[in-house]
Image (cartoon, rainbow, N blue to C red):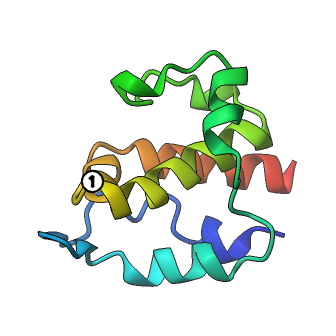
Amino acid sequence: MFERLTKYAGKLADRNMNVELGGGTLGLEDFVDDFYELDGFADTSYFETLERHGIDTSEGIDSCDIDHGDIDLIRACITWCVRGDRFCDGLLAAQARSGFLDRCLSRLKELDEG
């Protein structure tokens, strides 16, 4: 169901990425395109979803318990990363480099196959 995104699991942290002022993260365009093309995946209420899961987004979301997260939490985290890059250049690259995005995608794959 989510193969369009889970195919990237474990593959984003090592990508060559650049941050362009006013242009967001370069080097992840294919992932971002697939994110937006997967109908119904983006969580339009991602802030509320994160709050419902006890996540304080003012400090980022790196402390999120991705390994035990449900599908709603994973969708919200991925949406937060992608949407956040529109407002804070380099956010998506930082989340990819740290491995956070790969962990989200791995958990999504686990839930999708499970």
Total numbered labels:
1
Q: Position of residue 33 (x, y in %)?
A: 52, 83
- Residue on which disc 1 sits: 88
Q: Residue at x 73, y 22 (%)?
A: 52
Q: Residue at x 35, y 22 (%)?
A: 59
Label 1 SS:
loop
Q: Quadrant of residue 71?
A: top right
Q: Nearer the viewer, residue 3 or 33?
A: 33
Q: Amino acid at mark 1?
A: Cys
Q: Nearer the viewer, residue 105 or 42?
A: 42
Q: Is the residue 78 above or below the residue 82 in the image?
A: above
Q: Residue at x 80, y 47 (%)?
A: 111
Q: Is the residue 7 above or below the residue 13 in the image?
A: below
Specify the farthest residue to the top. 54
Q: Is residue 44 left or right of residue 101?
A: right
Say few, some or many: other residues with alpha carbon within 10 Å of mark 1 (under 14 / 14 to 19 / 20 or more).
some
Q: Is the residue 88 above or below the residue 26 in the image?
A: above
Q: Is residue 106 left or right of residue 83?
A: right
Q: Position of residue 54 (x, y in %)?
A: 63, 15
Q: Quadrant of the N terminus?
A: bottom right
Q: Position of residue 53 (x, y in %)?
A: 69, 21
Q: Quadrant of residue 39?
A: bottom right
Q: Residue at x 56, y 43 (%)?
A: 77
